[in-house]
Amino acid sequence: MRVLKESGSQCGVIHLVFVHNFSDFAGSCATDRAAIEAMGAVPAEAGGERALTITSGTMILAQGD
């Protein structure tokens, strides 16, 4: 998490990663949330002057769509 927190000192951060461990989807989501919170902590403390962009997938489509 140290590296993620340090990333907030940059002009902006783009979060593109997700742990694709679907046997523990809740755990993957918890890891993702912790990463986003770590990356967002520094820009928030700096007055919100830095960008944080987050991507997400679409896990709600029916099979075959």
Image (cartoon, grey):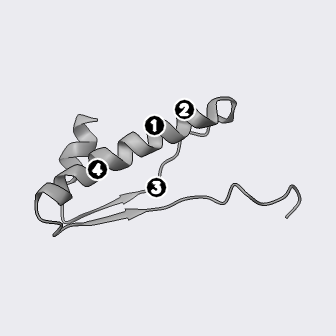
> What amino acid is found at the position of numbered circle 3 in the picture?
Leu
> What amino acid is found at the position of numbered circle 2 in the picture?
Gly
Q: Residue 55: x and y, percent?
A: 49, 61
Give me the C-alpha separation between circle 4 and circle 2. 18 Å
Label 3 vs label 4, nearer the camera: 4
Per the image, label 2 sits on a secondary structure element best described as: helix
Give me the C-alpha separation between circle 1 and circle 2. 6 Å
Q: Residue 4: x and y, percent?
A: 28, 43
In this picture, residue 15 sits left or right of residue 55: left
Q: Are marks 1 and 3 in contact (CB under 8 Å)?
A: no
Q: Looking at the picture, does residue 2 appear above or below residue 46?
A: above
Using the rendered view, name the quadrant where residue 23 is placed.
Answer: top right
Q: Nearer the viewer, residue 34 or 14?
A: 34
Q: Residue 32: x and y, percent?
A: 46, 43
Residue holding disc 1: 31
Residue holding disc 2: 27
